[in-house]
Image (spheres, rainbow, N blue to C red):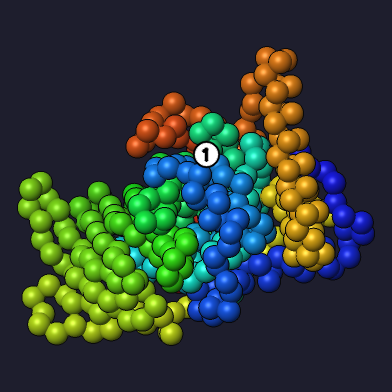
Amino acid sequence: MNSQIPPNPSDPSQNSIYPKITQSLDPRLDFNKYSDKSSALLGLLKSMKIGADLTKIQAPLKYISGISGLEAKALWTRPTPYLLSLYTIEDPVIRIQTLLNHILVNLNSSIRDTFVHSKPYNPILGEVFRCTFEHEDSTTEYIAEQVSHHPPMSADLSYNIKHQFIHESCSVMKMILTGGFNCAFKMSGVNNLYLINHDEKYEMDGPGVRGFGLLFGSAGFEPAGELIIKNTKHNLRCKVKFGKKLKMEGKIQRIEGKKKTLLRSFKGTMLGKIEMTEAGESTSSVWYDVDKLNWGTAPKVRGIEEQEENESRRVWHSATHELFVNKDEDAAQKAKADIEQRQRDIAKKRKEEGVEFEQQFFKKTGEQVNGVTVFKYKNWDDLIREISEKNEEEAEDEEMD
């Protein structure tokens, strides 16, 4: 692991760069001032074939975001107010619709009109990222761990005891080169949301992300493919298709055997407005307006000097500090290479000694989903018990009132 920290780790400059980096992921900012095309990228792409795995390439430093893929995942799944409201919504159709709203808000983090500072570091084996999201009435805890290196797999979990939810995922990330010097990004595996007080489980799959204009024309990233949300308890399914230029359309259905009943349909653009139409109605109404969305709060992360050696910001801090504070690309490249070489040396030693890597917070279940080995949070049963007890206490308080 990388235990080296630039001098004076208590200096505010050691930590102040990270809020600026995470803020730069806001899709509402203007990135047109950046120039995305470079001879370095041209040479890199010319040497690759269609279908090549882009997660394994050494991207030019101008494209590095400065945070780990584990932290980026926390930003992509942050608990919005729409997620927090689910435990109070009684109608299951409105719940799945509100969950869709939550997902669409977070999908905005994938929309960019530049490749500059867009690629996170590939997490090293055993790397951990922890943060909290502070709300007016509660706190959401988040933890992620890189549980496998071949294939590169991460597991993460977030939960809020007051708002009665647990979100878990275990996924393999892949970005491949497609035709026309475009790329496609996809995470495969498990992505589930549990609403404890409603005794519900939502299974979510997709969408992917399309990168376009790697060399020519307008450049950027946008959601692509399909998003599917399933709630088997109430036989509900939400299916959304994402097209080019941020267009999307979808529907919510009740599926009972072969019978499919349309409940809601919607259509619009991600950075504009989306209109919702209820089944049987001839008129639609604006359901989603990007200018009126509630984006939620930013994550709170402990300072570098307080983190363990395997925590993301400390692992990669020497490279990020050189790149964003000292603005020395040569030093940043060396720091990044040193971190990655240290990981290879540790893996080699472990193999020579016959020691099997043991995950810190997640354990292998033996289950396979979409070809991905599932890892589960080690303290899952205790967490379920804690949230259930909180739910029972609140129910008793309501009866007394």
Work out whether residue 377 or residue 149 is closer to the camera in this orientation and state it. 149
> Where is residue 301 shown, x and y percent of the image?
70, 60
In which image quadrant can residue 277 be found? Answer: bottom left
Residue 385 can be seen, yes or no = no
Q: Which residue lies furthest to the right in this view?
A: 8
> Where is residue 131 shown, x and y percent of the image?
65, 57
Left or right of 222 in this view: 336: right
Residue 205 can be seen, yes or no = yes
Left or right of 125 in this view: 341: right
Q: Against 390, is 374 above or below?
A: above
Picture residue at 57% right of the left edge, 45% below the top: 57
> Where is residue 336 shown, x and y percent of the image?
73, 47
Q: Against 271, is 346 above or below?
A: above
Number of numbered discs on residues: 1
Dot 1, crowdedness within 10 Å: few (<14), some or many (≥20)? many
Picture residue at 58% right of the left edge, 65% below the top: 116
Picture residue at 72% right of the left edge, 15% below the top: 353
Quadrant assignment for the C terminus: bottom left
> Where is residue 219 shown, x and y percent of the image?
46, 68
Work out whether residue 320 or residue 155 is closer to the camera in this orientation and state it. 320
Work out whether residue 342 or residue 45 is closer to the camera in this orientation and state it. 45
Picture residue at 45% right of the left edge, 48% below the top: 175
Left or right of 176 in this view: 130: right
Helix, strand or loop at label 1? It is strand
Q: Which amino acid does label 1 sit on?
A: Met
For mark 1, what is the residue?
Answer: 153
Quadrant assignment for the N terminus: top right
